[in-house]
Image: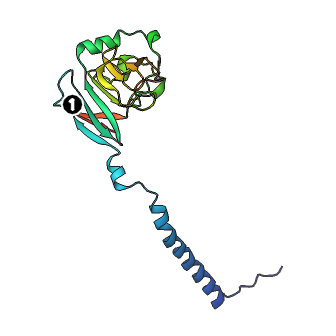
Amino acid sequence: MATPSLVEPTRRDFLYLATGAVAVVGAGAVAWPFINQMNPDASTLALASTEVDIAPIAEGQSITVKWRGRPVFVRHRTAKEIEEGKAVPLSDLVDRAARNPNIDGGDTADATDQNRAAAGKEQWLIMIGTCTHLGCVPLGQAGDYDGWFCPCHGSHYDTAGRIRKGPAPENLHIPPYAFTNDTTIRIG
């Protein structure tokens, strides 16, 4: 059996390895700015979430805040509005899906009034304020169901933001949000 001969590395082998290492570091240094420029802009990251103080919002009042360039309706509903929302049978709804990322299962829940609001905070309704038909901004406390009315094409939403009449195919969407305390919500 022949024993393998050990070959000493030469200067040429060292130069090949050193040249390859420098080439890898150089390629990384050139590629890094191109990869880094694909990250979101700082102003975009700043809009990724927003905090809203809801303490000054009186019962029956709505405010509109901006989140990711879109209007978000924050409504402090009255007891009457909550009861109107709960009284609607699911069979009367055009869109029966809740589409609330804040509840377990996301799209799997029915579009009941309870699934449209945060658990234990039914008086607060937070929705993206664009009509699901063509993206117009609906008017609050208007329309046939005292909710929202889209003046562009006549969609009517009820007090829970569910489409009741008109060309809109879906309920007003619910953004991801959380109550950080009793008077502050974080959207996004």
Q: Quadrant of residue 36?
A: bottom left
Question: At label 1, which amino acid type do we have?
Answer: Asp
Specify the quadrant that holds the N terminus.
bottom right
The residue nearer to you, when weighing 85 against 20, is 85
**Residue at x 47% of width, y 10% of height:** 91
**Residue at x 38% of width, y 29% of height:** 174
Q: Is residue 120 left or right of residue 10?
A: left
Q: Residues within 10 Å of mark 1 (few under 14, many from 20)?
A: few
Q: Is residue 99 visible?
A: yes
Farthest residue toward the front? 152
**Residue at x 57% of width, y 82% of height:** 18
The residue nearer to you, when weighing 32 against 44, is 44
User: Could you tell me residue 104's position as x and y percent?
Assistant: 43, 27
User: Could you tell me residue 136's position as x and y percent?
Assistant: 39, 31
Q: Secondary structure at mark 1?
A: loop
Residue at the spot of label 1: 182
Number of numbered discs visible in the structure rendering:
1
Q: Is residue 146 left or right of residue 131?
A: left
Residue 171, compared with residue 7, is above or below; it is above
Q: Quadrant of residue 11?
A: bottom right
Residue 19, compared with residue 186, is above or below; it is below
